[in-house]
Image (tube, grey):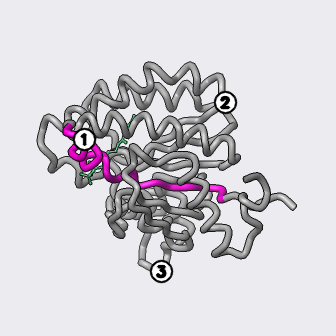
Amino acid sequence: MNAQIPKHIAITMDGNGRWGKARGLSRSEGHFAGVKAMEKVIDACISLRVEALTLYAFSTENWSRPLDEVNYLMSLPIKFFHEKLPQFMKRNIRIRTSGNLKKVPFPTRVAIEKAVKRTRNNDGMVVNFAFNYGGRDDIVQAIKAVVREKDVSGSQDITEMDIEKHLYTNGLPSPDLMIRTGGEQRISNFLLWQAAEAELYFTDVYFPDFDETDLKEAVCCWQKQRGYVSIYEKSM
Ligand code: FPP
């Protein structure tokens, strides 16, 4: 029997700053190490045949960080997509984004939008970058879009399906498994609507150290919770 795999995994990549500090490095160096871990997690999700992976890369709350750190985080997608886009094309990965890109510096926005556009016909795994993303903002913008679209005359005219249709994650399956690294057990405004039925998994591992084994551990935990055959029984 094949092991069931979560269709959609979402990850809060926390602990980069502390990872850097623990090594006498800067927070930005921690984020750089986080990018390397992110690349490995993408590879691991492809191997597991996950359909969609959402990565919490920059939250609406992250703007309050020191300017040099915000600037560094804004520079990451430019470098990352410049280097990785050819590989994503080769591997049939489709890039998506969730969040308000209008408020993101122009060069960063252009890099993200270019990746989304170039990969839009790929039909392999979706890698969805939550960038300038907030769960509350997501719900509010979806309600506004419904009101605009439907010419709503009363609140009874709005259904859950209408809102779903306008969320930033529209078209993706709801996340089955939401992982947070870095030891804190909070949602931090991530996929508030979409998390309704998700399994939450918290690990103390700082994101730069999070690897394929840790990912499989989380998947295995999800499989146990749901009463499915574990990947360990199958392949490890
Ligand atoms: C939280 O760790 C992490 C972030 C705010 C950023 C995560 C971003 C990446 C891993 C890379 C994104 C890259 C691209 C290409 C979009 P933290 O700084 O809050 O860690 P701490 O809790 O230890 O301080």
State how far apart marks 2 and 3 are (Cα). Answer: 42 Å
Asked whether mark 2 and ligand 1 are closer than 8 Å, the reply comes as: no
Judge from the rendering whether residue 72 lies leftward or rightward of residue 236; answer left or right.
Answer: left
**Mark in front: 3 vs 1:** 1
Q: Report x, y in % for residue 172.
A: 59, 53
- Between 93 and 102, the one lying in front of the other is 93
Badge 1: few (under 14), some or many (20 or more) residues near its Cα, within 10 Å?
Answer: few
Which residue is located at x 30 percent, y 24 percent? 107
Q: Is residue 11 magenta?
A: yes
Q: Report x, y in % for residue 149.
A: 47, 57
- Between 229 and 5, the one lying in front of the other is 229
**Mark in front: 2 vs 3:** 2
Residue to which mark 2 is pinned: 92
Q: Quadrant of ligand 1?
A: top left
Magenta region = 6-24
| Residue 147 in view, yes or no | no
> In the structure shown, which secondary structural element does the residue marked by tag 2 occupy?
loop
> In the structure shown, which secondary structural element does the residue marked by tag 1 occupy?
loop
The amino acid type found where label 1 is placed reads Arg
Q: Report x, y in % for residue 70.
A: 20, 39
